[in-house]
Image (tube, rainbow, N blue to C red):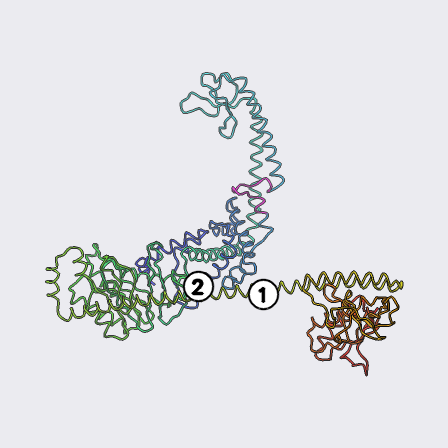
Amino acid sequence: MNEKVYSTLEFNKIRAMLSEHAVIELSKERALSLEPSTDIKEVNLMQEQTACAINLMVKKGSPPIYCKGDVISSLKRADMGGVLSPADILGVGKVLKTARKFKDYPDDIPCEAIEEYIEALFDDKTLEKTIFESIDDEANVADTASSELASIRRKIRSSEGKVKEILQSVIAKNSKYLQDAIITMRSDRYVVPVKAEHKGSIKGIVHDTSSSGMTIFIEPEAVVEADNEIRLLKSKEQDEIERILRALSGNIAQYAKVLEMTFNCIADLDLIFAKAKFALKCDAFRPTLNDDGYINLRKARHPLIPVDKVVPTDIYLGKDFDTLVITGPNTGGKTVVLKTLGLMTLMAQSGLHITAQEGTVISVFDDVFADIGDEQSIEQSLSTFSSHMVNIVNILNSVNYRSLCLFDELGAGTDPVEGAALAVSILEDVRKKGAKTAATTHYSELKSYALSNPRVENASCEFDVETLAPTYRLLIGIPGKSNAFAISSKLGISDKIIEDAKSRIAGDNIKFEDVLSSLETARRDTEKERDSAIAYKQEIELLKERISNKNKSLDKKTDKIIEDAHKEARRIIDEARAESELALADIRAAMKKKDLKEANRVVEQVRQQVIADSKKHNVTSSPGTQAGKPPKSVQLGQEVSIPHLNQNGTVVTLPDNKGNLVVNVGIMKMKLNLSQLRTVSAKPDPVKSGIKARGEIKSMMVGTEIDLRGQDLETAIMMVDKFIDDAVLSSLHEVRIIHGKGTGVLRGGIQSYLRKHKRVKSFRLGSFGEGDSGVTIAELK
């Protein structure tokens, strides 16, 4: 592409803005000379590199670039055997540090687009460490560069300290002869300022005289030898520094070529990250690329217009039409549309993200031509029209199907009739060559040309006649009006003159302008209706979102209530199990001692707890208990209810004359009185569990097997846990657990639970005749 179009479309200003974001001088130079690529693969790669850099910067911050100056000349000098200055060596050290840090910069974040650059970086921790230990941040050779240098500098400091002490003594004794009571330097020697009239009062060597002649700088005799010693030490210091710099330069020379390549890679990375910084600052996005000539800019903003003033616009070209004819009044934004279209294309082809919304499409062109602005040349004695024609001739000689052409005020500056005809012919020639074109004009003939050609489309920049101000919106599909009569009338031209002017216009032109007015009115009405529809739609979407959020909130609250209920139930069951185990332990201890009284006491204590918990948790008594009066008589084997235990039992002995009798309750025989018994109205369940949640006591009679088939694992484990407690309470030594064969999940879960149960001594699968692998036989402790 020619350099002129960069200036015309202000791409040079974009390159200058980009260079400000670069760190390294070489990168800044490359930014200022950035060229758009015409290869879509290369453009896609550059766009991917910019996107990758943006992702890294957002997640990891700015890249670790410590080098700024150009070190290539230093590396070449070292490679030729030259000795580098401390500043040059420090610059190389910063390149090594940048390379090392850059290798760790991406971390685990994918960055394939720039991975090749990072992998090519050379770093040498030993050389880097040596450089930074030898050269300080101020580009001076540090004391740590060598032990010899450190020793020499210690001696210099010591000697200088002694000289200053001697001079302070001289000043104190001869202050009346001195111009100022200070120690200064002349020709690297320590001197004192002596008044000219007293120069003989202090013996020593004169090194300088002030410009006025009033002061003589004398090195007192007492410090001459010390000064000589200092000069000797400084000579040794310089020799050691020279040796250190030569050694460092030699080390750098070994890697000169690879370090030069590394520096170039860092400069390339710096430019890529400069593009990322530019995109973040301008709120730019990556466009979708094609090489078919299709452009669709969505809410495009000219990057050089301040954000608070720029009006985003939609521009599309190359799909349904190849040529866009833009009309409208002056200062309406037509030229800005052309520059935005051209500038977005140049930026995208240079790997820059563009200031438009996501979803924007840009085509890659071989050439972008622009004839914009005043081309008048005084030196060549060319008028504005002639200058434009010279530029257009060059464009027509170079244009092809992979070109984008931008014409501003095509055909202006000459006779309107001839200018309009020439403009139509130029556009038609460019269109037939396959180029994509956008042109601005005031000529009605071009509007008609666009209406009569299917591959040419009209467009206009909107203008508010009421406020006499442009809105800068591009309206594609609607030809624009110059609005000369309306603007003139608003500014004060009399209606008589306006009407006279209208009468001088051909009837066809008046009808055409009336059609444009009707189209404009219809468009405004349609936009108002569309905006209302959009507003209603947004309101509906907002209401739907609110309702959805409320439903989600209710679902969360419901889930929370259910979850809390499950937790509370689990807590109650756990507490009940703990209390049951304690009660069972006490009962067993009493039974071993055959202490029936103690067993009854424990049962009564549990009963009272059950009653209290029943009231607290609304637990109803077990079925079969009949409230009322005690029975007058009972029979052997009769089932009776014992209300204070909330249990049923079987009469073992008949009552004596006092009503006392023995009742079998579970595994215990209890001595009770008839007054403590009640008749049973309904036969209860034959198998009762031992102790329910929170100590609810049922019958302690339990079978020797439990069938778990059809249960889920969690429910089955709870049933087995309760079954084993009841079995232990009933003094059973072996139980049969039926879980079925199935997939084996239930069997495995049950056996895993039994393995950890403290009351299970051992277990095995059932043998032939016992249920095989569908049954587990457990031996209890």
Residue closer to the observer: 674 or 267: 674
**Measured Cα–Cα span from mark 2 to mark 1:** 48 Å
Q: Quadrant of the C terminus?
A: bottom right
CB of mark 2 within 8 Å of CB of mark 1?
no
Report the span colored magenta.
130-144
Residue at position x 38%, y 62% in the image: 356
Q: Is residue 134 magenta?
A: yes
User: In the image, residue 761 lies at what x, y percent?
Assistant: 83, 69
What kind of element bears circle 2? helix
Q: Quadrant of residue 736?
A: bottom right
Residue at position x 50%, y 58% in the image: 56
Residue on which the image places disc 2: 47
Disc 2 marks a residue whose amino acid type is Gln
Q: Quadrant of residue 602?
A: bottom right
How many numbered marks does the figure carry?
A: 2
Q: Tag on residue 559?
A: 1
Disc 1 marks a residue whose amino acid type is Asp
Q: Tag on residue 469?
A: none
What kind of element bears circle 1? helix
Q: Quadrant of the N terminus?
A: bottom left
User: In the image, residue 524 lies at what x, y percent?
Assistant: 27, 66
User: In the image, residue 390 lies at what x, y percent?
Assistant: 23, 63
